Image (spheres, rainbow, N blue to C red):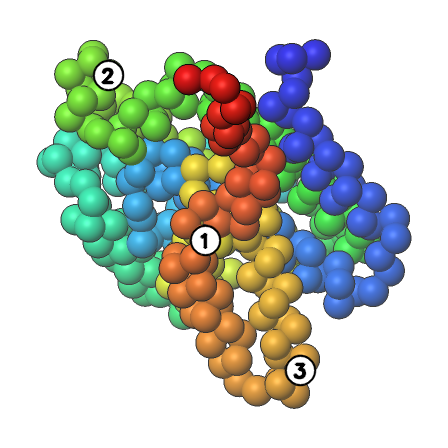
Amino acid sequence: MRTLRPYLPVLVLGVLLALAPLFVTSNVVLNFLVFTLTVALAAQGWNLLGGFGGQFSFGHAAFFGTGAYASAIWQMQLGFDAWTGFVAGTLAGALAGLVIGFLSFRAGLRGSYFALVTLAFAEVFRVLANSSEVTGGAAGLLLPLKIGAENLQFADRATFLGFVVALVIVVLLLVQWIRGSRFGAQLVALRENEEAARALGVDVLVVKLKAICLSGAITAAAGVLYLQYFLFIDSGIAYGTWISVEVLLAAIVGGLGTVLGPVVGALALHGVGELAKSLAGGLPGIDLAVYGAVLVVAVAFLPGGLVGIVRRRDRPRPVRDAAPVEGEA
């Protein structure tokens, strides 16, 4: 039972999310949950590299877009099915992570230099996708509508939400397992002090490459989900700065280096953003202003994110020294 205790919060969240399609009938709410959980999945990929490993990235759109485009090309131009396309897109994200990571980490880039390099890669990928016939150029790629589970296209949004929830929970369980593993301890050691970790015998390059490959694969899987839900992708969506910013904000607001942080952060950000838009009467850009305000508050007053608040409340308070009894020394 003790070994299962760390997984209980993930399982509880999974049950709550799995029950949502049974009680929610509004297509607006279902769309909100599908999109938000897709962003949360991508944010979990960012969190594995940035939150646990301390390797901040400004260009995770490179993995998101690579997964989406690889799956679309796999289905439309190579003629394979959507399920193998999902696997192909995920592996393409891992491969992109391996290439970007090897070129960056082998050169000794870290900190702000690594963050800027990832941003540069995402922009290069966007330019290439916008000018290539394989990716449809500026027009993008439109998947044909073929309703059926074999095509990862479902007749109702609730079914697709169930698939997204299942995938999110699997990834959360994986990250929870990594957190308690030797690999997770090595990631935290790199985040805290890379030189000390190297002195203790940690193979820094190998650990970083494992982290960025896993991060790329998870983020690419989110890109495939986006493609299968909206059935369209172009360079601006796939490699746009919007997804890089969204995943970073969700992880920071929810709690860096926590398992549930990216999901909590994504739900909170998008929930507050939608509430602000409804109260402001659809004022353009109001959600972005709210995101900025939430980020400032989180950085200034919630260094552990929203999940950190719960942790601090659950932490036992130190017992103060009792007043000496009269007559005692």
**Amino acid of disc 2:** Val
Mark 2, secondary structure of its residue: loop
Pick whichever of labels 1 and 3 is earlier in the sequence.
3
**Amino acid of disc 3:** Leu
The residue labelled by disc 3 is 279
Where does the image place residue 139, in percent across and percent down from the top left?
A: 46, 70
Where does the image place residue 25, in percent across and percent down from the top left?
A: 86, 60
**Amino acid of disc 1:** Leu
Reply above or below: 153 against 95: below
Indicate the quadrant where residue 135 lies.
Answer: bottom left
Task: Evaluate whether residue 235 shows in this view.
Answer: no
Which of discs 2 and 1 lies nearer the camera? The answer is 1
User: Left or right of 45: which side holds 53?
Assistant: left
Q: Residue furthest left?
A: 107
Query: How dense is the environment of label 3, judged by Cα within 10 Å: few (below 14), some, or many (20 and up)?
Result: few
Pick whichever of labels 2 and 3 is earlier in the sequence.
2
Mark 3, secondary structure of its residue: helix
Kindly report the distance in space between the C-alpha atoms of the residues bearing marks 2 and 3: 52 Å
The residue labelled by disc 2 is 202
Indicate the quadrant containing the C terminus: top left, top right, bottom left or bottom right: top left
Judging depth in this view, the residue of 325 and 284 nearest the camera is: 325
Where does the image place residue 123, in percent across and percent down from the top left?
A: 28, 60
Mark 1, secondary structure of its residue: loop
Which of discs 2 and 3 lies nearer the camera? The answer is 3
